[in-house]
Image (cartoon, rainbow, N blue to C red):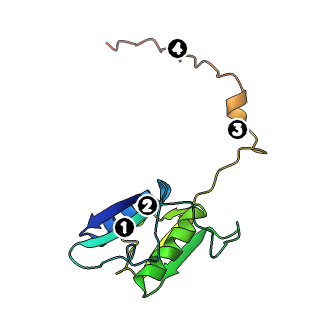
Amino acid sequence: MTDFMTVVEVNPVVFVNKIIAEIRNGYYVQSTMQGYPIMGMPNYINLFDTDEPAIIHPMPDEIQTLGVSGYDIMRWLLDVQDAILQGFVPSDTPAFVDNYKTITLVRATVASLEGLKPAESATEAPVAKTKRPTKPKTIKE
């Protein structure tokens, strides 16, 4: 008996977010009768706890933004899973899913601080500010 996770959701954006979260947790989309998504009210899919699937379309490291498009929901979910396994995450735009046809994914990059010089002001000791002397007030008669 294979362990599986059922994702049920009405909102399509939340549905895809839940699928992506479960892919990261080790549950994967499978193109089987038991794993085929049912789209409607609500949307429904079984994700399976199996070995990590092989990467179908390897992406070079230079690609930072990826648009996954398609009309067949199973093929589309397998392509999204393929991108997620390569380190892509959903973009920050709120409506990144368009009727299960297009999703925009970005690859998270790690910033390197190597080779950066510190700002000059950060290396110098702060200079204490001196108060200006106050002028004596003159009284007019």
The residue at which mark 4 appears reads as: 133
Check disc 1 and report the residue beneath it: 46
Identify the secondary structure beneath mark 1: strand
**Other-residue count near label 3 (Cα within 10 Å), few / some / many at <14 / 14–19 / ≥20:** few
- Whole-Å distance between the Cαs marked 1 and 2? 11 Å
Which of the two marks, 3 or 2, is nearer to us in this view? 2
For residue 127, what is the image quadrant? Answer: top right
Which residue type does callout 1 highlight? Asn
Separation (CA) of disc 4 from disc 2: 82 Å
Q: Is residue 41 above or below residue 23?
A: below
Could you tell me which secondary element the residue under label 4 belongs to? loop
Residue type pointed to by label 3: Ala
21 is higher (above) or lower (below) than 117: below
- Residue that carries the numbered disc 3 in the rendered image: 119
Residue at 34% x, 81% y: name it. Answer: 99
Residue at the outermost right position: 115
Pinpoint residue 85: horizontal percent, then vertical percent. Answer: 57, 63
Left or right position of 98 against 127: left
**Quick check: 114 above or below 99?**
above
Mark 4 vs 1: CB contact within 8 A: no
Q: Earlier in the sequence, mark 4 or mark 2?
A: 2
Closer to the chain start, of discs 1 and 2, is: 2
Q: Is residue 106 visible?
A: yes
SS class, disc 2: loop
Q: Position of residue 60 (x, y in %)?
A: 71, 70
Q: Secondary structure at mark 3?
A: loop
Residue type at the position of mark 2: Thr
Q: Residue at x 68, y 31 (%)?
A: 122
Q: Position of residue 114 (x, y in %)?
A: 76, 44
